[in-house]
Amino acid sequence: MSGKETELECNEERSQITTNSHADLLVVGPGVLGSLVGRRWLELHEGCRVVGQTNTTNRHEELLSLGIFPVTKDSHSGDKFPYVIFCAPPSGSENYAAEVRLAAAQRWNGEGSLLFTSSSFVYDVHDNGHCDESAPITEKGTSPRGDRLLNAEEEVLKVDGNVVRLAGLYARDRGAHMYWLQKGTVDARPDHFLNLIHYEDSADLCIEILRKNLRGQIFMGCDNTPVSRQDIMDIMMHSGKFAGNFHGFTKSDGPLGKKMNNSQTRERLGWQPKYNSFKDYVSTL
């Protein structure tokens, strides 16, 4: 089926369903995380409409199979939604802040909630030190990546939307652990601490924020179990659940990481992750 045919089928199906407009959700960037959010939203809000806005039609058939109605960003009808989540990464946009501003100004109707999924990269902690929601933020001009994220956050916060700064996302076959396993030998420090959150937990956290109908708040997403690069690979290889050979990390200098704790976020939302650590998750495989 061509992209155009998929779009037409999607529009036909949209006209035939009964929608609960007060719970309709727009997912800008329905990749792994965005698709999970959309699917779980449908389970929680019977009869609502979930629309996934993409740059291309490549995944439209897949989105339709999940119950998510796909539209490309240059062909949408101009509908506004009470709930909007922006999950698209900076890599897919020449002007990321403008893309986020467009979603905030033209797609959110100001009801429900607007949420932008940012990154814990913006926290200025690089000595394996403690990092919670009040940790210092990277100064603008320090990093192009940091600037893109912070500028996008500002666009959301100035219209009373919310931001969640997520740690490293992972699933069984997605994440830093799989990249390192495929490389075999990695030119990086083994004692650099990382912070993780499973895709499923990240989706649940995003939904919890959206459903609270909050305004202008910043949250942190992590499992509260910082882990070194070496420990990640030791857990993975000792589990017997992954095929391949990992030979090690070869660097002994360079910047370290951070040890994140999002207890404030958990208390404010009443949220807890399903997987309290990477080790806990691997034990379930």
Image (cartoon, rainbow, N blue to C red):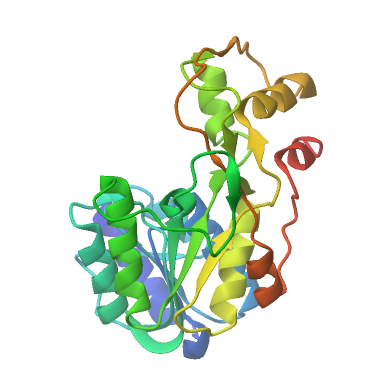
Q: Nearer the viewer, residue 251 or 16?
A: 251
Q: Is residue 194 above or below residue 80?
A: above
Left or right relative to 99: residue 49 = right
Q: Nearer the viewer, residue 232 or 105?
A: 232
Is residue 91 something one can see in this rendering?
no
Is residue 164 something one can see in this rendering?
yes
Left or right relative to 226: residue 2 = left
Residue 284 at what x, y percent from top left?
A: 80, 39
Q: Quadrant of residue 64?
A: bottom left
Residue 270 at what x, y percent from top left?
A: 72, 74
Q: Residue at x 59, y 82 (%)?
A: 212
Q: Is residue 177 above or below residue 118?
A: above
Residue 269 at what x, y percent from top left?
A: 66, 75
Residue 110 at what x, y percent from top left?
A: 38, 89
Q: How many marks?
A: 0
Left or right relative to 89: residue 31 = right
Q: Residue at x 35, y 74 (%)?
A: 156
Left or right relative to 57: residue 21 = right
Q: Is residue 222 above or below residue 213?
A: above
Q: Residue at x 56, y 67 (%)?
A: 206
Q: Nearer the viewer, residue 174 or 155?
A: 155
